[in-house]
Amino acid sequence: MEGLSRIWQWLCAPAAGKKDQHYSTSPYVNEEKCIACGKCIEVCPVGAAFLLGDVSRIEPNICISCGQCMESCPANAIDIDWEHDIPKFLECLTEYVYGDVKGKKDRVGYINFLLRITSDCDCVPWRDAPIVPDVGILASNDPVALDQASYDLVNKQKGLVNSSLHSNHEKGADKFRVVWPMVDGTHQLRYREKIGLGSRDYKLVEI
Ligand code: SF4
Ligand code: SF4
């Protein structure tokens, strides 16, 4: 959810580019937590995870940072350096988009579907319970304004209980920080504006 326009970000990069975007996030195994179940080895698409003694290891030169092992580990033993890796990852996503749409402002439009909003990104193979009610469909020729408006509209909703949103249910409270406490949801918006992808200013027009 941290990048509401993730779909178009993915479409702007070839397979090698997607790997390049993820390379800043290097998962590691917390040996204290690993129960040697082998699940990470099973799901790893490139054979980067392996058991050494009674703990799992990840070979960084093989790992493509797809994150499947993190999602599958029953002991939450696999993690990344959220403080340093995630900002770099988000900036890299933004740069790929910028490279593709630069100079095409009048020829590219963007649409955000704020429907069935869940905490995880589109990479995960499951559907979770929505954290806020459906908001609607937003469109703009400025991707930064579009995502800023989307971000604000999500936070303006009353949060839904029985979802991964465990607090900040009141209208106006930051829903993003609750579901991803280690990620600054505005970092990517600020970086996009900084490199000239668009403006965080917007005016909502309801139709
Ligand atoms: S992040 Fe992906 S490639 Fe790297 S070890 Fe985990 S499953 Fe394998
Ligand atoms: S999935 Fe988690 S607990 Fe299981 S072997 Fe891998 S790191 Fe260890």
Image (cartoon, helix red, strand yellow):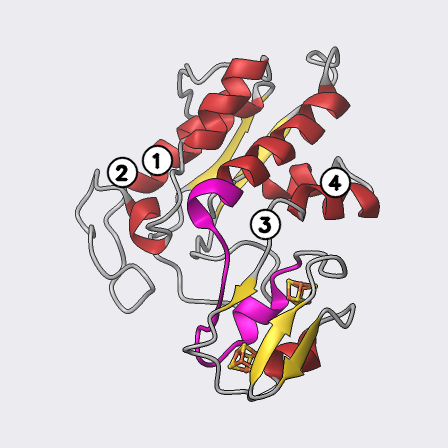
Q: Which residue is mark 3?
A: 25
Q: Amino acid at mark 4?
A: Leu
Which x, y percent locates residue 137? Answer: 50, 38
Q: Amino acid at mark 3?
A: Thr
Which x, y percent locates residue 187? Answer: 44, 31
Which x, y percent locates residue 177? Answer: 31, 46
- Check the image and name the residue furthest to the left: 170
Residue 207 in view of the camera: no
Q: Earlier in the sequence, mark 4 or mark 3?
A: 4
Which residues are the magenta region?
Answer: 66-86
Q: Are marks 2 and 1 in contact (CB under 8 Å)?
A: yes
Q: Amino acid at mark 1?
A: Leu
Marks 4 and 3, Cα distance to the nearest angstrom?
A: 20 Å
Q: Amino acid at mark 2?
A: Lys
Decide which of 33, 166 is in the foreground and name it.
33
Q: Is mark 2 within 8 Å of ligand 1?
A: no
Q: Which residue is mark 1?
A: 153
Q: Residue at 72% across / 15% down in the picture?
A: 102
**104, above or below 170, in the image:** above
Marks 2 and 3, Cα distance to the nearest angstrom?
A: 31 Å
Assess disc 3: are there few (<14), some (14-19) or many (≥20) residues with their C-alpha within 10 Å of its C-alpha: many
**Marks 1 and 4: which is nearer the front?**
4
